[in-house]
Structure formats: C-alpha cells, structure tokens
Image (cartoon, rainbow, N blue to C red):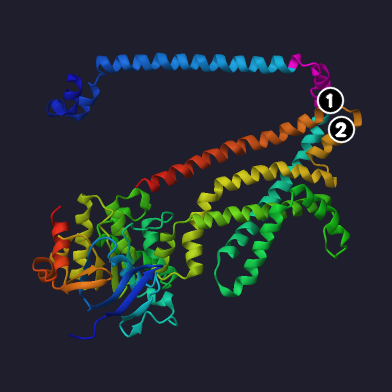
Amino acid sequence: MSEPLLRIRGLRKQYGERLVLRSIDLDVAEHQVVCLIGGSGSGKSTLLRCVDLLDTVDDGTIHLGGTELTDPRLDDHAARRRIGIVFQAYNLFPHLSVVDNITLAPRKVHKVPRKQAEEYAKELLARLGLSDKAKDYPDRLSGGQQQRAAIARALATEPEVLLFDEITSALDPELVGEVLDVVADLKQRGLTILMATHEMGFARHAADRVCFLEDGVIREQGTAEQVLTDPQHESTRRFLARVLDR
Amino acid sequence: MDVSIEDSGGESGEGGDDGAHMEYRPSAGQQERERFRRSRKRRDQWIAALCTLGFVVVVVVGVVASPGWDRVHSLFLDHSEFTRTFPAILRGFWLNVQMFLIAEVLILVLGLLLAVVRVTRAPGLLPLRLAATLYVDVFRGVPTLLLVFLVGFGLPALQLQGTPTQPWVLGVIALVLSYTAYVAEVFRAGLNSVHPAQRNAARALGLNETQTLRHVILPQAVRTVVPPLLNDFIALQKDTALVAVLGPLEALRVAQINADYDFNYTPYLGAALLFIAITIPMTRYADRLQRKVAQRTWAEAGR
C-alpha cells in the first residue's frame, strides 16, 4: 500500500482531567472511506476536531500528505482549506442563502470570482438534489436538505479529505437515507472520507474500513465485514449487540 | 363525529377534495363550544372596559379633588400660555432632533469599532484593547449630566486650536462620549451571543479571524442587537435635553426661558409632549422588533 493520505500516530487529547483520546493510530488512504464507530463519549468527534485543528492535540502527530498538521508553526488557516468537515448540527450560516453559504469560502478564501464560484455551487447543488433551494435561507429547509447543503459547502473548496461528524444523528429517521445516499455517491467519485457514524448498516456496505473506538483507543479495526460481522474483541461484540439490538 | 369521518376522506372519491372541504360544517358540539367562547369573550371585554373606566374616574377625581388642583391647573395647564409658547418650543425641538441624529450616527460607528477592538485577539492590538476597556469603564460610570458639564465648560477652557465652541456641538460630543460606551457593550454582547459553532464552521472552511468576523459573526450579531440598540437611542433622544444646561435654544431651554418669564410652567408640558411624541412610536417599534428576534431565536432553538 502506498503512503496514506492521512496518518495519525499516538494522538492524545484531554479536556481538563478527562482523557478523551489516549493514543490513536490511524491511517486513511486516498479514495478510502473509513468509519469510526463507538459509544457516545468514546472520542470519535474529538478525533475529527483534532484532525481539522479545531482543537489542539496534547500529544502525537497528524500528517496530511507531506504536511504535519500538528506543527504549531503551520499556517492553520491554510491547512484547514485542504480539509472539509460537516457537523452533526449542520451549522449553516443562517444569514446567508444556500448558494452564499456554499460560495463564501471559495470567494473569500480562495479568491474565486463570484460567477465561477456560483456556477460550481449550482453544479454541486444539482448533484445533491438541491437545485431549487439555491436562493432559500437555511431555516426554510428540512434537516436532510440542510445537511446536504452543508456537505455542498464542504465540497465547494475541493478538499483533499472530508470529515463527517455523525452527520445523520440530528435527522429524522426518514431523512437519514437521502444524506447517506450522498455519501455513497461521494465514495463512488473517489473522495477520501473519515466519518464518525452510528449507522451500522451504512458502514457495512460503504466503509472500506471500520474502526471501533473505546476508552480513547482504537480497540479493533478492519474491513466492515470483519469488524461488524465477526468482531474479535469482547467490547466490540458488546457494543454491536447493544446498537444492533434496538 | 359523523362529520369528521366524512371529512377525512369518505367523500374524496366522489366529490374530489374541494367538494369535501366545501361541505364541512362544524358539528353541533363544536358550534356549542364556539357559542360559549364568544359569550365568554364578550363578558371579558365588558369587565376590562368597566375596570378601566373605574380606574380613570378614581385617578381623575383624586387629582382634581386635591387641595392644590386649582393652582396646578393654572400653572401647568394654561391654554393661552401653551398656544403662545408652543411654536418656539417646537423650533427648539428641531435642534434636539438634529443633535439626536448626528449623535446617533457617530455613536453607532464608534460603538461598533470599540466592540470589535475588544473582541479581537491579535497580540499587537493589546494596547487598543486596554484603552477600549478603560474607556468603557470610565464613561459608563460618569453620569451623563456631569459629562455635559465637563465637556461643555472644560473643552473650550483648554483653548486648543480647532476646538468647537458652539454649545450644542459640545453637548453632542458629551452625549457621544457617554452613549458610545453603552452601545459598545451592546455590540460586544451581540458579538458574543453568536453560537461558537458558527465560528468553528467558518474556521473549518479556512476563513481567517477577520473574514470570520466580517462575514459570519458580525452580520448575525447586528440582527440580535437592533432592539436593545433602539432602547438606548430612545434614552439618547430624551437625554438631548441635558444639553439645555449649556444654553443652546433646544426645547427644554426654550421652555425654561418662557417659564421663567411669567412663572407659568405650561411650556414644560409642551416640551414633554414633544419628547413623548417621538419616544412612544420608537418604543413600540423596539418592542415589535424584540418580539420578532425572540420568535426567531425560539424557532432556531426549538429545532
């Protein structure tokens, strides 16, 4: 296997007394979809926030391509431009229309002319089935539409890696499918995705690799088949029994 | 019961949707409920009207029956005095309005600047941040009237070149100094009220601090602070009368001159009416905006 696009070694993060990530080692190769699973509080979201430099790590390294993201001398704004993140609560900008939400970063950060940025935004919206919502404000959209708009916003800067932080957890059950379909489409297009998720069915058929987090470490990782169907670790079995039993 | 069952689709096969809606008539039970609600509402309106009337009668009788009423009536409610002095007071009030408008623009700009300075984190701006904090602490603490005296008499005494000497300009400067401190705090509260997730979302897209502030935080903050700002401006509108102590012929000063002339205080009432005529619509408007912002916040929180 060639050099992974994202390489995490010995990552440690604590908030005050609470140790959230003890020591995380994780590789994500280009064009791979890696799913992080685990109970709430197991550190999935923290891991993603550390990768996007929204939190400073307490030890360990994160490399994206040849760049060490954890180097404090790094221009963090420049580094974040190479990474796209979508949050559980969408976090669209409520004062901007959908198309302005999407074109803000390309226009202001990447200095793309407005016309060109809007054309690309329209293309993205068409792909995500939101063509008729371009001029609407986020509060006029359903949860699923807002989350797809948030994905379009993250895609607009053409990041090298996408981070999805439980992007379906805030959605009504009947809206989960439309968002997961988008993720599956992105996988088809060869994007590199690291996502925290509770959707085991989705992980099973879309993930190249599944990692089970517990107590701040990756207890078990492997193909979706291995981890979800034939888990080796006792705690993975317990976790899966709990979530699949519902 | 029968009606509701028919309405919920029993007929839609034959008559179409429109037909089903046209034929809906409230059931006997529902009609009885609505009759009861209407009569209850009429009764409430009667109670409200009678209570208000009784209250007004008590107040009016109490005031008119008071031992000093005749004297008050002739001193404060003199019709001929009112018509004689009101035009002059109205002309004076135009100066209040001008002072208010000029001060308001300056206060908005300076207040926003101060607030932005106070929320920045760039190390090079520390002296500015300290100065802004000191300014807000000092000028929020000094009574506005005292500031009007200090600026009105102190600034010309310095005899610096280019210092304005017109009393109304000095008065505006004092008002701006005082109110900028308040308005800066309102803006700062607005900036801090934008959810941290918004800042994270902007940073995650690669926006730097300045871009985040300008395109994401500021527009949202301004929407929230409009109602409290209006409240401050209602107070400012009233406080333009404080400039009277420096002598320019604004409404209160004109009223004062007329009252001193013949010891009839009706001109003060005229001035008061003018201030109320401006502040009451502003208050109502501020209330309406506040309700709208609250509704939006609840809607967003309720999701």
Badge 1 vs badge 2, beta-carbon distance below 8 Å: yes
In space, the residues marked 1 and 2 are separated at their CA atoms by 9 Å
Instruction: Specify the label residue B50 is tagged with.
Output: none
Residue at left offset 80%, top offset 20%:
B73
Q: In this view, does B229 lie above or below A185?
A: above
**Residue type for callout 1:** Glu
Q: How many residues crowd mark 1 within 10 Å: few (<14), some (14–19), many (20+)?
A: many
- The reply, left or right, for residue A159 in relation to residue A36 is right
Compare residues A245 and B286 and report the one nearer the observer: A245
Q: Is residue B294 visible?
A: yes
- The reply, left or right, for residue B68 in relation to residue A85 is right
Q: Which residues are the magenta region?
A: B64-82
Residue at left offset 33%, top offset 75%:
A12
Q: In this view, does B218 lie above or below A195?
A: above
Question: In the rendered structure, the residue with mark 2 lies on which chain?
Answer: B
Q: In this view, does A3 lie above or below A181?
A: below
Q: Quadrant of the N terminus of chain A?
A: bottom left
Instruction: Give the image quarter of residue B158.
Output: bottom right
Compare residues A6 and B38 and report the one nearer the observer: A6
- Tag 1 secondary structure: helix
- Tag 2 secondary structure: helix
**Residue type for callout 2:** Asn
Q: For mark 2, what is the residue?
A: B258
Residue B116 location, x and y as percent? 58, 62
Q: For mark 1, what is the residue?
A: B81
